[in-house]
Amino acid sequence: MRGYLIETYGAPTSHRIHDMDDLVPGPDEVLIDNQAIGLNYPDALMVMGKYQKRPEPPFRPGRDCAGVVRQVGQNVTGFKPGDLVVAQVFSGAFSEQVLAPVSRAFHRPEAVSPIDAAGAITVFNTAFVAVSIRAGVKAGDRVVVTGAAGGVGLAAVQLANALGAHVLGVVSSEQKAALVRAGGADALILKDRDEETLKQAFKDQVRSHWGDDRGADVVIDTVGGAMFIAGLRCLGFAGRMVVVGFASGDIGSAKA
């Protein structure tokens, strides 16, 4: 089979595809003929050696995949060859064959393409933890999502909308705003990245968006930096702020 092999940590573009031996499932594992992969920010961090968990090279990177079960190992009763699946593994998804523990593999409906399935698993898992578990979003809540056109941001928009919340997605262009609106949210376009201008515009426009000065019940922040501080400023009474990531590269800190 072919797949990416990380021989030493380095920039994402520094790695290459290798020919490797076919894989064999062990007990409680399924072997998947891979049809699609999900590519997310943690994958880039992993191959550079900057993720919080670092496998020692050489290793095959990649977390998300979707395909068809080729073979099952001992003790596996929930899957059989030919089953359509999606899986999230710690590493190894960026290969033509993927080994997945049965606890990390899931049946995939025929109506869901492998591309959609592989592209959704990390972003929707992350968004679900942020929106439902940590923020406890419920119908009627006012929810602001920063970086709302990104993978996790757009998933958070869709989930909050499905829960009946009033959602406002913060983006940087009209093109991104169109994505957010299609996901069920209003869009706030902030192009000026000057820190003070951004923070003031964010606070003023969020607090006036719903026609009063109540502010947001929840802010889901994927950007960090100045956007994080602006999100804190727009929270209403007993509001909840959930930090998901730092796409800006700047980890913001809250002044108590």
Image (cartoon, rainbow, N blue to C red):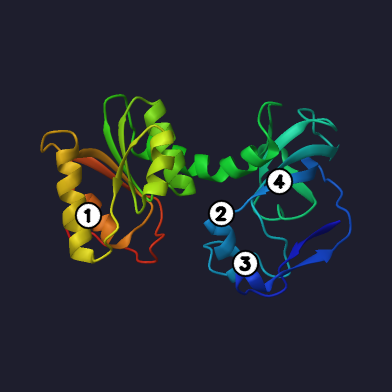
Mark in the foreground, 3 or 2: 2
Q: Are marks 3 and 2 in contact (CB under 8 Å)?
A: no
Mark in the foreground, 3 or 4: 4
Vertical order, 136 against 29 (above or below): above
- Percent x, y of residue 17: 78, 65
Q: Which residue is mark 1?
A: 230
User: Does any portion of residue 228 appear in the rendered image?
Assistant: yes
Dot label at residue 47? 3
Precedes in sequence: disc 3 or disc 2: 2
Precedes in sequence: disc 3 or disc 4: 4
- Percent x, y of residue 199: 20, 57
- Image position of 217 (left or right of 23): left
What's the amino acid at mark 1?
A: Ala
Q: Residue at x 83, y 30 (%)?
A: 80
- Image quarter hosting the N terminus: bottom right
- Mark 1–mark 2 Cα distance, whole angstroms, equals 26 Å
Q: Are marks 1 and 4 in contact (CB under 8 Å)?
A: no
- Mark 4–mark 2 Cα distance, whole angstroms, equals 13 Å
Q: Which residue is mark 2?
A: 40
The quadrant holding residue 57 is bottom right
Q: Residue at x 67, y 49 (%)?
A: 37
Vertical order, 100 against 78 (above or below): below
